[in-house]
Image (spheres, helix red, strand yellow):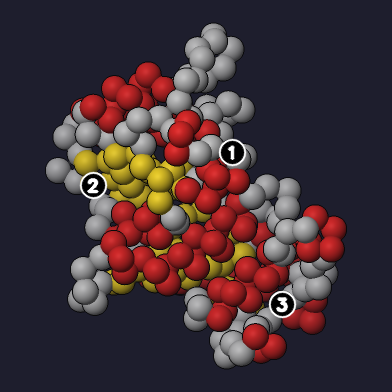
Amino acid sequence: MGKLTIGCFASLVGSTNLDFAVKLAGAALDKGHKVDLWVSGNGTMLSLQDQRAFKDYSYLEKPVKELMEKGLNVTACEACAEARGYHDSNTLEGVKRFSMDWYLGSTFDADRVLHIGGE
Amino acid sequence: MATTKLGFIVQRPGYKSENPKLALTHAIASQSVEIYLDDEDEVTCDVAFIGDGVLNCIKDQKAVENYQLNSTESHIKMALLCDLNIFVCKEDLDKYGLTENDIVLDANEMGGDLEVKVVPYEEITKMMEEMKHLLFF
């Protein structure tokens, strides 16, 4: 089995790029691959806890929690998060926060890297 | 010892979105990636500005004066100081009527030796072929 590193810079609300990234991560996990998901820029919104589900807005807290239980490794850019007022105290349990070199480190032994830029 | 080569391809103009600056800050982060790797393993990053992305390279940006933000220009200089290869597409500069005189080419005033390489797109495609992974911003 392989390793997939996904970098997503798109926000939780505003496009469905993060939705796609999370769905792809789930599909790869189901096939037995290891998946790292890096969120940076507006993508760090994914790391917020207490998201509220509305039918008109993307809601990924529940699926991300379920995927993390299956082994999905989610890491948010700490500087990008802090700049937006997303602190340790309101970060979804299980989501890690590191600096940008973590993403590059994850690509080192990744079989594939899928980078999804921001809006 | 193993090396993973990453190619950062910047296609969007500066300041309209965060992407170009994030491309540069992530590429510069290659300077500290060794904390996640075994001894002597490394990740290297080349950065290429193509299409509208070449507009990021215009010199004398006033981001600090107007927005109290570090300019994309200063990040390009920082990348040069970190010895990252920076490519700028010659044809796309031409498309905007820009020449090497209009863009940041070096970080000499900061003690940098490396210079931006203005090259035909063909050379950028060669660079991309040498990379293990490409990241489009």
Residue situated furthest top in the rendering: A55
Q: Earlier in the sequence, mark 1 or mark 2?
A: 2
Q: Residue at x 53, y 43 (%)?
A: A81
Q: Chain of mark 2?
A: A
Dot 1: few (<14), some (14–19), or many (≥20) neighbours within 10 Å? Answer: few
Q: Amino acid at mark 1?
A: Gly
Q: Nearer the viewer, mark 1 or mark 2?
A: 1
Q: Residue at x 59, y 87 (%)?
A: B112
Q: Chain of mark 3?
A: B
Which residue position holds label 1?
Answer: A85
Q: Amino acid at mark 3?
A: Val
Which residue position holds label 3?
Answer: B104
Q: Residue at x 70, y 63 (%)?
A: B70
Q: Residue A40: x, y in percent?
A: 50, 45
User: Which label belongs to residue A3?
Assistant: 2
Asked if badges 1 and 2 are on one and the same chain, I answer yes
Do the residues bearing badges 3 and 2 touch, measured as CB atoms within 8 Å? no
For marks 1 and 2, give the CA distance: 31 Å
Dot 3: few (<14), some (14–19), or many (≥20) neighbours within 10 Å? Answer: some
